[in-house]
Image (cartoon, rainbow, N blue to C red):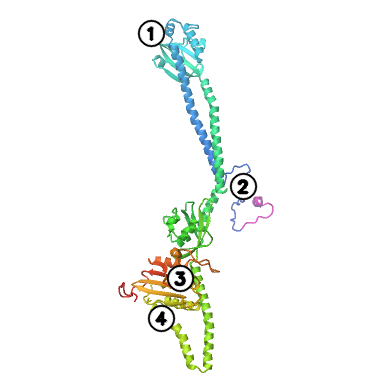
Amino acid sequence: MVGQRGHDTVLGTAGASGAGAGPVTAEPGAVRGAAPQPPPARPRRPRPWALRAPRRMASQVLLVQLVIAVGVTALATGLFLAPLSDQLDDQATHRALAVAQAMASDEDLAGDLLRAEPVRGNPVQRSAERVRRATGAEYVVVLDRQGVRYSHTDPALIGRRVSTDPSRALAGHEVREIDVGTLGRSARGKTPLRDADGRVIGAVSAGIRYESVRDRLTGAVPEVAGYAMGALGVGVLGALAFSRVVYRRTRGLTFSDIAALLDEREAMLHSIREGVLALDGQGRVRLVNDEAQRLLGLGRPRAGEPDGIGRPVAALLGPGRLTSVLTGEVAGTDLLAVRGGRVLVVNRMPTEDGGAVATLRDRTELEALGRELDATRALLDALRAQDHEHANRLHTLLGLLELGLYEEAVDFVTETVGSHRATAEQIAESVGDPLLAALLVGKATVAAERGVALRLAPGSRLLGRLVAPHDLVTVLGNLVDNALEAVGAPGPSVPAGGEDRLVEVGLRARGRTAELTVRDTGAGVPPTQRELVFADGFSTKESAPGRGGRGLGLALVKRHAQRYGGTVSVAGAEGGGAVFTVVLPEALAAPEGAASDPHEEEGR
């Protein structure tokens, strides 16, 4: 019992040590007997004295430039001082050898060496000391073939053997070296000493104190360091100036900020449903997003790069209003242009570097809806006018019936109904496509309410099946609308009312080619404007309220004609007005079950 209680006490103490006083509660999922988990580590607070790497791009560039400048300066200084030390050593050994050679060239020295004894005050000692004092050498030693000194700066060493090996000099060779002798480290020069017969009888060794060489090197270091610090200062100033330029150009952003901006820009440009086109100062394309490629018909990206990058916009799109708007030749906001059958709204914003950013919006469907709205309004006006006219006719018919004039009433009804039916039947007999026939019937009704006569030209006949009826409806509808507006606007040759207000439509087939002509008795088109009327945005009339602009109808006609490989032209009509002619090759489908005959449906 005592041992058991003691064991429980130990367990309780161990359990309480981690949780304080009180019972120990096991956490859910904990394994009994497992070691307690350490508490989560607290996040370290940044130390105020700890060095932090700069985040801004300009600061990082400055730091890199400073490191490079310091490193280059230190390397250049080291490369300059390293050969300087060797050059000073070489100069010192050459000087020492020159002193030794000058001493050995004394004519009396060889005889004095052979006659004298290696003791103090001998003639060789006196000559060597005279040369040493004259040249400033540390020592001048003359020795015989056994290496015994006959002279030395320290007279106590005269008569003793030299401390370094003289064998090379005694063998007839000149020696230059840095070595350590009895006087310490020195730059030495040794030369053989010869008698009158040229035999080597000894050697002369001269030395220059190495501390003098080191002093020269040490004296050159401050000057070299001054030049190095000057160069380093110039480098630091240049780095600071460049860093300020980088700071202004990058607007104080970090590398991560720039990378994030690039990622966000790419995501934004390729996700928005507006075309974005960026040009540089020379008018070259430097950015185009997916929507702009689609609207401009540039094709899909190839090799990871969109088509047209780096090319001038004039060479990429060709001459036209769209190019003039993008290059800034035509200024304004929400400018309209046509590209490949699309009506585009273009806005251009210049940039600081002389380039520009242009946005493109597709307005084709909106323009089509606007035209449909105009047609609907015209139809409503026509129906409202017909309602009044119908009421007048009913009142007339009622009066004839009340007066008992039954035959006159029958003739009146027959005449009223027959005129409209005759026009519809004439169009249906000459035009085989129902959409095109319905367009002409509707336009005839609108023209009649405007006081304009719309009729088919004599010999008009287009009975073949059309390849794309909607294209011909667009072409003919725009031409008729343009003619109705021209006739409806009073001018020099347009009377305010009467039978002279006429629009005549001609339809002919030549093989598979459709030829459309629309003649009006309006003011006509001046010869100087007959090419401009087909340009995007060109119009001689003011914009109607609620509409984005004019000058698109004839531009669309030209685009459709070019798509078919055809032509569109305008000329003056006889008696005044204008004649628009559109030729559309391959507009008619080939007859089924037979080869197409080029003259199969030639107009009669």
Residue kind at label 3, given as amino acid type: Asn
Assign a secondary structure to mark 3: helix
Q: Amino acid at mark 1?
A: Ala
Q: Are marks 2 and 4 in contact (CB under 8 Å)?
A: no
Asked if the magenta segment contains residue 11, the reply would be yes
> Is there CB contact under 8 Å for labels 4 and 1?
no
Q: Position of residue 140 (x, y in %)?
A: 48, 13
Q: Which residue is mark 2?
A: 44
Range drawn in magenta:
9-27
Q: Earlier in the sequence, mark 4 or mark 1?
A: 1
Q: x, y percentage for residue 578?
A: 43, 70
Mark sitting earlier along the chain (1/2): 2
- Give the distance between the C-alpha atoms of the residues marked 3 and 4, in whole angstroms: 22 Å
Q: Earlier in the sequence, mark 3 or mark 2?
A: 2
Q: Which residue is mark 4?
A: 426
Residue carrying label 1 = 196
Mark 3 to mark 2 CA distance (whole Å): 76 Å
Q: Quadrant of residue 511?
A: bottom left
